[in-house]
Amino acid sequence: QVQLVESGGGLVQAGGSLRLSCAVSGRTFNTYAMGWFRQAPGKEREFVAAISRNGGITYYADSVNGRFTISRDNAKNTVYLQMNSLKPEDTAVYSCAAEVGVLPGTEAADFDSWGQGTQVTVSS
């Protein structure tokens, strides 16, 4: 298994931007598809974005499509989530996840390893 550590969360005003990073331990990062999920207080965890192991295929939730961009740097064992035009409803704990395979799923159950999460708060 791999270890995942997120960073980059914080407090931002509506309309602002943040970039989340997820550093992954181990030398097999390029064998994992990666995803980002979020969970707001009182709500279930929801899919945000995912990327294939070579970065060529990406998936987004409808709620973030066009505002968020997932990317990865396999040389740095890191996956990113660039979040633009943030809205108060984007407030949540954001977690990255890893799944062995070429293409990522969009369900939490598809992923094998998880980070602890980083808080993103968007003020109105």
Image: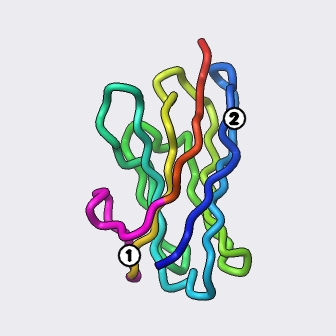
Q: Label 2: which residue?
A: 17
Quadrant, the C terminus: top right
Residue in the foreground of this view, choosing between 82 and 36: 36
Corner quadrant of residue 33: bottom left
- Say if the magenta span includes residue 107: yes
Badge 2 density bin: few <14, some 14–19, many ≥20, Cα 10 Å: some
Nearer-N-terminus badge (2/1): 2
Mark 2 touches mark 1? (CB < 8 Å): no
Residue 37: image location, x then y, percent: 43, 49
Type of residue at label 2?
Ser
Q: Position of residue 39 (x, y in %)?
A: 40, 38
- Residue 41 in percent (x, y) is at 39, 26
Against 10, residue 4 (above or below) is: below
Location of residue 56 with respect to 27 vertically, above or below: above
Read off the residue under disc 1. 103
Look at label 1 and name its amino acid.
Leu
Question: Between residues 71 and 122, which one lies in front from this camera angle?
Answer: 122
Q: Residues within 10 Å of mark 1 (few under 14, many from 20)?
A: many
Magenta stretch contains residue 1: no
**Percent position (x, y) of residue 42?**
32, 26
Callout 2 secondary element: loop
Q: Residue at x 69, y 35 (%)?
A: 17
Secondary structure mostly taken by the magenta-highlighted segment of the chain: loop
The magenta segment is 101-114
Residue closest to the far top = 124
Residue at the image point whose x is 69% and y is 39% from the top: 18
